[in-house]
Structure formats: structure tokens, C-alpha cells
Image (cartoon, rainbow, N blue to C red):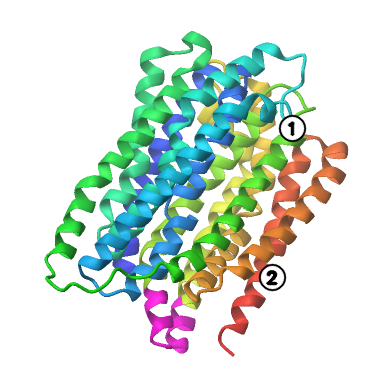
Amino acid sequence: MFKIATLVAILTVLSKLLGLARDLVIANYFGTSMMADAFNLAYLFTGNFFIIFGTIGGPFYSSVVATLPKLKQNKATWYFIKNIILKTTLALTAIAFTLFLYKDFLLKFFIDEDKLEYMQITQLNLDILLPLIVLCGPIGIVFAILNCYKRYVEPSLAPAVVNVALITTVLLMGDIANGIALAIGTSLGGILSFGFQIPGLIKVRSKLLEHKDQEPEPKNNHYSKILVPALFSTGLAQAMVFIDSFFCKGLEEGSWTALILANRLIQLPLGVLLTAFLVPLFPRITELVKEIKLDEIKRLLKKAIGILTLLCIPASLVGMFWSEQIIRLLFERGEFNTHSTAMVSSLFFYLCISIIPYVIKDSFARTCYCFGDSRSPFLVMLISIAIKVILNFLLVERLGLNGIAISTTIVSFISAIILFMVVKTKFK
């Protein structure tokens, strides 16, 4: 399992480095400008769905991983897979169309009425990014299917495909047409990354259809039981981002972009570590839950979280002590000036404190899903949102943009403690 984790980590590092290159290119062309804010706000409604719902660890992925290993591997299982992909695609298409119709109404909550140009550019970006909503479900399902059948390369490299497409598009188009190169490159990358998974899915299909038995298609009761609360829980996590965006409304231009950049830098070590362990560990825990081997689950979980925590400590300390130097070295060129560096580095400092509790929180939430318990992470998320709103209200007025980062860190600690207590009850 840890050999697989190493392989996935290496592939994820490649994708994350390309993600860093993407952010460097965007910062060079757009800095913390209005065009960058417009893209990032439009991305909040579209690309964030793709990242949160459609990647490894998302609700579609977790639900399939918690269901597929328990099914017999035959023709009926393939028809089950095909059915959930089709239904998911249709449902997400309806959501994308609804967003297209009501985008003007939604954006008014995040953009002041006198900022007409900002509103128009954001609307244009949002229209171009809508395909990402449709893709987030199918791609998350396919990632899980491939991982369950021991195919790790394609899902791990998918983010790299998105980043290469975005970088290439921005380098070719630059900042023309109000920066829509960002939206075009992102949507193109999402489509290509899904296409990158198709050969692996075809091989899985062939393997399942080799069986000649005619058993009835498995019922999706267990899948739905995990998916529905997981969608709500993840949607509530998405609500956290919307809350932060709302509190950025009255702050200076570029505040939302600065917060996005700081968060993406934090996700560089987190993405590598969590993805490396999510892929081999949690399908294995699901199998052990089925076999009722609680001692083995406890051993694996302790070892994984221990290693993750030890790896996160240096990442957290380096980010805290050299936050300004890191941001200046990486981004300060082109349109990204010294003021941009000051904004992002201050946020980065506070968010680095949240790295360790974030890893623990996420690991325990995934463990709950393996036990078939999606209710507990959902309730914890409800509590976290309530605390987040209160803290943002209290801190942003006094500390400005830094108040959002501080509230995020506090909420991560609280969530990690509560989920630890929940998981502990599973072994009694």
C-alpha cells in the first residue's frame, strides 16, 4: 500500500508543480487585478465544483470507493457503473443550465452594484466555465472506478492535463479580451482530463463484460446512502468558500485573488500528501470494514495519520517563518507587485498553521465514509459553518482580510477534534 502511496505522491507532485507553474503564469499576467478577481469569482461557482466534487476524495469518488469493492465483479456491475454515470451527468447538466439562467441574480451578492465592468467580465468567465459543473460528477466516479481496479496513473495525472491546457492557453492569448484565456484554458483542460481517463475505463469495462453470468444489476441503495449526505457535506464545505467570498466584498481590489493564491499554495503539500494516502488507504479500509477487522483498521489509520502529521510539520513551519520570502520569490514579477506580495504572504502565514489539523480532519472524515457513516461529517460541517460565519463577522471587521485566514485555521482545529472523537467511537 505504501509503495502505491509513493507512486501516487510522485505523480501528484508533478501535477502540483504544474499547478504552481499555472499560478505563476496567471500572477505574471494578471497579478491581483480586477480581471483576476473576475475569473476567480466565476471559478468559485464552476471550477470549485470540479475540484471539490470531481477529484480524488470528493463525494462521488468516496461513494464509489465505499460501494464498488463490495459488489461482485461481473456484467451487472458494469451496468450499475454506466447507470450512475448517466444519471449524474443529466443531473449536473440541469444544474449548469440553471446557473446560466440565474447567474445575474447570484453574482449580485458578491459584486457591488457600481462595479459594472467587474460584473460583465465575471459573467463572461462564468459562461465559459460551465462545462466544469457537468464534468465534475462523471470524472469523480471514473477516478474511483480506476483506483478500485488498481489503475493509479491516469487519475493522478489528470490535474496535470488541466494545468498544461491553462498555461498553454494563457501564453498564447495573454490578457486579451478581458482575460478570458483563463476561463477558456480551464474548461478545455477539464474536458481533456476527462478524455484522458477514457482508455482506462474502457479496459475496466472489457474486464467486467468478460463474465458470462446474468446476475441482476446491483441496487444503488448503499451508493445513494453514502452519496447524498456526502454531497450535502461537501456542498457545505463549498459554502465555506462562498462565505469567505462574501466577506471579501467590501475589502480592497484583489482581496479574493490573494486569498485564492494563498489557499492554493497551502494545497500544494496537502494535495500531495492526502492524495498519496487517500488512493491506496481508504479502499483498503472499506474492505476491512466489510471483514470487521477493526484492529487492522486502527493500525493502518494510526500509521497513515502519524506519517502525514510528521510530513506536515516541516511544511507548516517553513511556510510560517518564510512566508514573505516564499511569495516574493515565486510571484513578484510582471503585474504581481510588492503590495500583492504583502497581501498574499500575510494570508499564507496564518493558513500554514491549519495544515496539520486539515490533514487530520480530512483523514477522519474519509474514515467515517468507509464505515458507511456520512451523517457525522455532515453534522460536523454544519457546526463548522456556523462557527466560520461568527468568526468571519467578528474578525474581518477588526483584522481585514487576515481575519478570514485566522477563522479558517480555528475552524480546522475544531473540526479535527470533533471528528477524532467520532472515529474513536467506531472502535468501541
Toward the viewer: 70 or 6? 70
Q: Residue at x 65, y 43 (%)?
A: 241
- Does the segment drawn in magenta span residue 293? yes
| Residue wearing tag 2 | 418
Q: Quadrant of the C terminus?
A: bottom right
Q: Are the residues at dot 1 and dot 2 in contact (C-beta closer than 8 Å)?
A: no
Q: Tell me if residue 35 comes above or below residue 420 in the rendering.
A: above
Horizontal arrangement in the rendering, residue 423 relative to residue 198 (left or right):
right
In the displayed structure, 154 sits above or below 30; it is: below
Quadrant where the image shows the N terminus:
bottom left
Instruction: Please provide the residue range marked out in magenta.
Output: 284-300
Q: Which amino acid type is marked by label 1?
A: Cys
Question: Could one spot residue 149 in this view of the protein?
Answer: no
| Residue 104 % position (x, y) | 65, 24
Mark 2 residue element = helix
Q: Quadrant of residue 165?
A: top left
Q: Position of residue 86 (x, y in %)?
A: 36, 49
Left or right: residue 334 versus residue 17 is: right
Q: Magenta-highlighted stretch: main secondary structure? A: helix
- Label 1 belongs to which residue? 248
Q: Earlier in the sequence, mark 1 or mark 2?
A: 1
